[in-house]
Image (cartoon, rainbow, N blue to C red):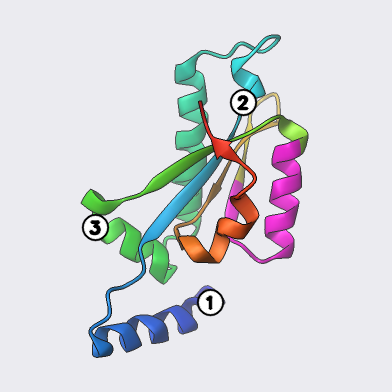
Amino acid sequence: MHRGAGLAFRCARKMASSGLEPPILVQYLVLRKDLSQAPFSWPAGALVAQACHAATAVLHIHRDHPHTAAYLRDLGRMRKVVLEAADERTLKELAETLQQKNIDHMLWLEQPENIATCLALRPYPKEEVNQYLKKYRLFK
């Protein structure tokens, strides 16, 4: 079981017994903006596919985490936020920061080129991770 699962289960039980609503879970994705521009000029569909790959992979890897399970139980209330990173270096720096802070994520590497294209976090309560993401703008 994931290292934070015990705490998450205890929190969920405590909220259920107190009548409090469970936290709203958000899945954040950070996609490279430079891939949509010259010299890369990837089409929108290719960028969307990268985000889908990263999101699917992190959900699968962390499928047993209570937050992921809760997120997937209520498909109609899924929340995703897609942010933009300027380039590959910026995306990799974010991945290093998240790793140092023990924030579960997946850095998607497009093959066979082996380039980082998108980073996806598993579902988290917004207040647990927004400090690491607040400098990134919504993807346009």
Query: Which three-letter amino acid code belongs to the residue tagged 2?
Result: Lys
Mark 3 residue element: loop
In the rendered view, does 104 fall on the left or right side of 25? right
Query: Label 3, on which residue?
Result: 74
Q: Position of residue 88 (x, y in %)?
A: 73, 32
Residue 93 colored in magenta in the image: yes
Please tell me whether mark 1 or mark 2 is closer to you in this view. 2
Residue 56 in the magenta stretch? The answer is: no
Image coordinates for residue 131, horizontal then vertical, percent:
62, 59
Give the residue type that dot 3 points to. Answer: Asp
Q: Earlier in the sequence, mark 2 or mark 3?
A: 2
112 above or below 64?
above
Label 2, secondary structure: give it: loop
Placement of 15 over or under 57, stated as above or below: below
Badge 1 crowding class, 10 Å Cα cut-off, few under 14, some 14 to 19, many 20 or more, is: few
Q: Residue at x 50, y 20 (%)?
A: 46
Magenta extent: 90-106
